[in-house]
Image (cartoon, rainbow, N blue to C red):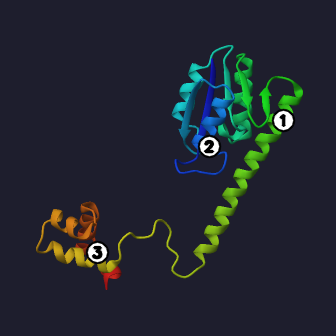
Amino acid sequence: MIYGYARVSTQGQAKVGNSLDSQIKMLQDAGATEIYSDSFTGTKMDRPKFNKLLCELKEGDTLIVTKLDRIARSFIEGSNLINKLINQRITVNILNIGVMDNTPSSKLIRNIFFSFSEFERDLIIERTQEGKAVAKTKAGFKEGRPKEYTGEQIRHALELLEKHTYHEVVEMTRISKSTLIRAKKKQKTGEIRECVE
């Protein structure tokens, strides 16, 4: 059996050659008859469909992926996985590298690609942390998601709650009931004054 595996970090990832549709087409063109796919970041080991696929693979099967980093992002994890599959007599075909086997040249290529992949991921993490550090020095920086509603909108919704039900206020303001309940609790404790004055 020829299996294919595709993975994107998020459902919305759409880089050329990395979208799920693009990967699946490449896998089909390469002969994959059954394809599994996940939308999980490569830094996480919990990839349900990939784990299921690993249980399906048997001696004589072929696993095709478009790029090495689709199945692993760390050197150790990737190297161990490929070696394990090869030792189980499962052919591993990485479309942008070639068929993986136990020859010294194949091992060298795998190690180089995984090392660069891990290096690239570490650079991204480093740049993200540097960007965050710079952002923290700027006035008005707030960590986390920006607030969906202004203090004025929340204040107005709380005023409406004095004469209307939660359901009615949700209909009028489009602010969720859970947000209104939280705002009401903050109002009682005095926390909301700061953002609505």
Q: Nearer the viewer, residue 167 or 189?
A: 167
Give the residue at mark 3. Answer: 154
Give the residue at mark 2. Answer: 42
Q: Nearer the viewer, residue 189 or 12?
A: 12
Image spot of residue 21 (x, y percent): 58, 41
Category of crowding for the residue at label 1, using alpha-carbon neighbours closer than 10 angstroms: few (below 14), some (14–19), many (at least 20)? some
Q: Residue furthest left?
A: 163
* Residue type, label 3: Ile
Q: Tell which circle, 1 or 3, labels the residue nearer the N-terminal end.
A: 1
Category of crowding for the residue at label 3, using alpha-carbon neighbours closer than 10 angstroms: few (below 14), some (14–19), many (at least 20)? many
Q: Quadrant of residue 74?
A: top right
* Residue type, label 2: Gly
Give the residue at mark 1. Answer: 109
Q: Is residue 173 above or below residue 45?
A: below
* Residue type, label 1: Ile
Q: Tell which circle, 1 or 2, labels the residue nearer the N-terminal end.
A: 2
Q: Residue furthest bottom?
A: 197
Q: CA distance from mark 1 to mark 2?
A: 20 Å
Which element is circle 1 on? helix
Q: Quadrant of residue 89?
A: top right
Which element is circle 2 on? loop
Q: Which residue sits at x=67%, y=45%?
A: 17
Left or right, 1 with reference to 180: right
Image spot of residue 192 (x, y percent): 30, 76
Image spot of residue 45 (x, y percent): 58, 38
Q: Residue furthest right?
A: 105
Residue 24's label in the rendered image is none
| Cβ atoms at labels 1 and 2 below 8 Å apart | no
Quarter of the picture holding the C terminus: bottom left
Image spot of residue 104 (x, y percent): 88, 27
Q: Is residue 128 above or below residue 141?
A: above
